[in-house]
Image: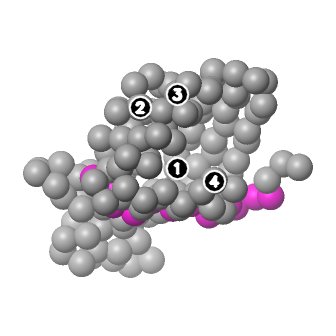
């Protein structure tokens, strides 16, 4: 897809998505992930059976739960692609392989496409809408 997104914006959005994966995979302070989003963020992971989340407090509760319940996380993004740019709002996608293991022994393995719509807030890029599309069937 051709887009007129400036190279520095594209790099910043790719870095934001990479920081997201590192933040989740660290299984540390959920604020490392929550800080990457705008206050009015909407996250829609319904394609992999998670609820749609609206607002930073709901997102914080979700990532706090992950931090408390997971022993391992691994996400590898690739094939970053600029989706759209209107001069203020930029959107990128990437394919992601993700795996995790919960403290109860449950394992998760997904192959998805992330889509992040981002804006600049006080000199830093933040995600305001984050969704994913399942690319492979979920395990039964």
Q: Are marks 4 and 1 in contact (CB under 8 Å)?
A: no
Give the residue at mark 2: 30
Quadrant (top left/top right/bottom left/bottom right) for the N terminus: bottom left
- Mark identifier at residue 50: 4
78 w.r.t. 130: above or below? above
- Would residue 112 be found to the left or right of residue 1 on screen? right
Q: Which mark is residue 78?
A: 1
Q: Are marks 3 and 2 in contact (CB under 8 Å)?
A: yes
Percent of width and height locating residue 12: 26, 51
How far apart are the two marked residues, 4 and 3, measured between alpha carbons?
Answer: 16 Å
What span is in magenta? 126-137
Q: Earlier in the sequence, mark 3 or mark 2?
A: 2
Is residue 31 shown to the viewer in this render? yes
Instruction: Measure the C-alpha gap from mark 2 to mark 4.
Output: 18 Å
Main secondary structure of the magenta stretch: strand
Q: CA distance from mark 4 to mark 1?
A: 23 Å
Identified at 19% across, 71% down, the residue is 88
Disc 3 on helix, strand or loop?
A: helix
CA gap, disc 3 and disc 2: 7 Å
Instruction: Tell me where residue 28 appears, x and y as whole percent.
Output: 44, 22
In the picture, measured across the screen, residue 137 lies left or right of residue 110, that is right
Is residue 5 visible from the viewing direction of this image?
A: no
Q: Which residue is mark 3?
A: 67
């Amino acid at each position: 897809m051709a887009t007129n997104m400036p190279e520095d914006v594209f790099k910043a959005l790719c870095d934001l998505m990479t920081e997201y994966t590192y933040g989740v995979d660290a299984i540390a302070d959920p604020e490392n992930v929550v800080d990457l989003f705008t206050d009015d963020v909407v996250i829609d992971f319904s394609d992999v059976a998670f609820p749609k989340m609206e607002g930073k407090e709901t997102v914080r509760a979700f990532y706090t739960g992950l931090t408390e319940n997971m022993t391992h996380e691994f996400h590898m993004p690739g094939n970053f692609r600029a989706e759209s740019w209107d001069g203020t709002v930029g959107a990128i996608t990437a394919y992601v392989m993700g795996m995790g293991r919960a403290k109860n022994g449950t394992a998760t393995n997904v192959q998805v496409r992330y889509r992040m719509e981002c804006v600049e807030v006080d000199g830093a890029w933040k995600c305001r809408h984050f969704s994913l599309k399942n690319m492979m069937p979920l395990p039964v």
